[in-house]
Image (tube, rainbow, N blue to C red):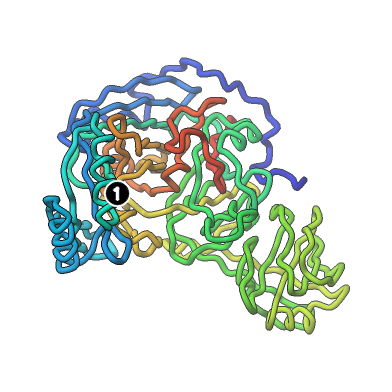
Amino acid sequence: MSRRTIAGGLAIAAALALTALPATAEQRTVRFPSAKFPLGARPVPTKAMTAVTQGIDLYDVQAGSATDGYTLTVLMPSGRDYGMQHTAEAKAAEVEAAGETPSVQKVVKPGVADAPSQTVYMVRVGMWPLKDKKKAEKAAKKLKEAGLKVKVDYLGDDGLKTTGPWSAKVVMVDSRMFRGSYAASLGRSVAKRETVSSMVKAGKALVGVNGGFFNIHTSKALRGEPVGASLVGGRLLSEAVPGRSAVVLKGRTAKITELKTDVTAVSQDGTKVEVNGVNRAATTDELVLYTEEWGAKTPSGGTDAVLDASGKVVGLRASGAAVAAGMRVLHGNGLAADWINEHAWQDWTVKIVTKVVDLRTKRALKLTPDLHVISGGVGLVRNGKVKITAKRDGHDSINMILRRHPRTLLGTTRNGSLILATIDGRRPGETVGANFVEAAQFMRWLGATQAINLDGGGSTAMVVGKKVVNRPSDGAERAVGDALLVLPK
């Protein structure tokens, strides 16, 4: 079993019991807001605070009330639940021919910092209160029998006007009083997924939340791989998607920025070549570096150069084997395999040069043992203003921008305090989640001047001590790619 990829020094025991360690208002650099809740009709929220340890407070936030019910949504020929106006009107005519009364609903996806607004149309049939979902399902069955494709939709999920309710958990880490540190964890390996609870336990952390998105489009055994930059203890374990949001953690500081990574293999004969990826599945003609944290075999059908810690080629082999402890493997197939065969001979040295650049400062990060990076999902707040970078960060869609989902959010304040939040969702009548605009407004309300959206949906989880304090929408905690840990030292 490969060593756990978490921050060094985690063997220090931590008392995880919740402890009341109050601070005066003058001492605090991050406070729960006194302003009205920013979503819906701006209700006054209820909150309960628990002191976790010195400088860390946990808030249970409840706001709003349930007034949304159910409707039927008729799917378009594309299979989507929305389309252009003429498509929606044609589909509405089919509903009328089936003996029902449809409505064509105009829906506007709000414009964000890097993508314009979009107007689409939906065909809806009927309206039922929350308690009458079975009646809606019965009506849907009738339309399906008439040859239409329909689904039952809870209106609170739409992302349009709602009264809620909202259920959130918020951890505020006070920069003046907190004496611990922050770290990233990928669990036992990069390739395999693991729960936040498991990573919190292994790291003896005080608090943990799920990290960035992981690759659901690769083979099942490799789906723990982060989509974007990941550094643990100064070691690059996943390359960046250039320009995407990320969280840089160093000691007890957290910074939101955008990153790019450059990895180059330099042969003893002076030849240089780009390394296309780190710890992920390889495509045709790619050169991919695998570290001991990978936790799976290298891809078959290529050539592996096994490197020791100094970069010496200690073995050449047909690919498809594990990475031994203390080793790295430079894998190539197609043209990349040719490069290995020509420039990575047995006992030669192949130097791996890694560069991680902060695109806001244009400076390379120092890859020290206290450096950690978690790839964010979407930028939400920058310099105190809502700035949603959904297109740049790969999530410019109606489903991601407008629709409500469970959210895991991270923000930093002007004085360097850290705010972690989860907003539960997908529980009609109990909590509706948030869309990107609402998530940004929520983080600004909490005092964040910089904020990002991490992975959400069924991945959303917050662990304090040994307990999952939110309610994951899958009904149980989901295994995820990585986690952010708040450590006692």
Q: Quadrant of the N terminus?
A: top right
Residue at 40% across / 37% down in the picture? 422
Q: Position of residue 348 (x, y in %)?
A: 84, 75
Where is residue 243, by image quadrant?
bottom left
Q: Position of residue 213 (x, y in %)?
A: 49, 52
Q: Position of residue 369 (x, y in %)?
A: 65, 49
Would residue 71 be found to the left or right of residue 350 on screen? left
Q: Amino acid at mark 1?
A: Lys
Q: Look at mark 1 in the image and give the residue it sits on.
A: 151
Residue at 55% across / 65% down in the picture? 261
Would residue 113 be found to the left or right of residue 29 on screen? left
Viewer-closest of 154 and 284:
154
Q: Position of residue 130 (x, y in %)?
A: 23, 32
Residue at 57% across / 62% down in the picture? 239
Residue at 75% across / 65% down in the picture? 329
Q: Counting other residues with Cα less than 10 Å from the Cα at mark 1, is it few (<14), some (14-19), or many (20 or more)?
A: some
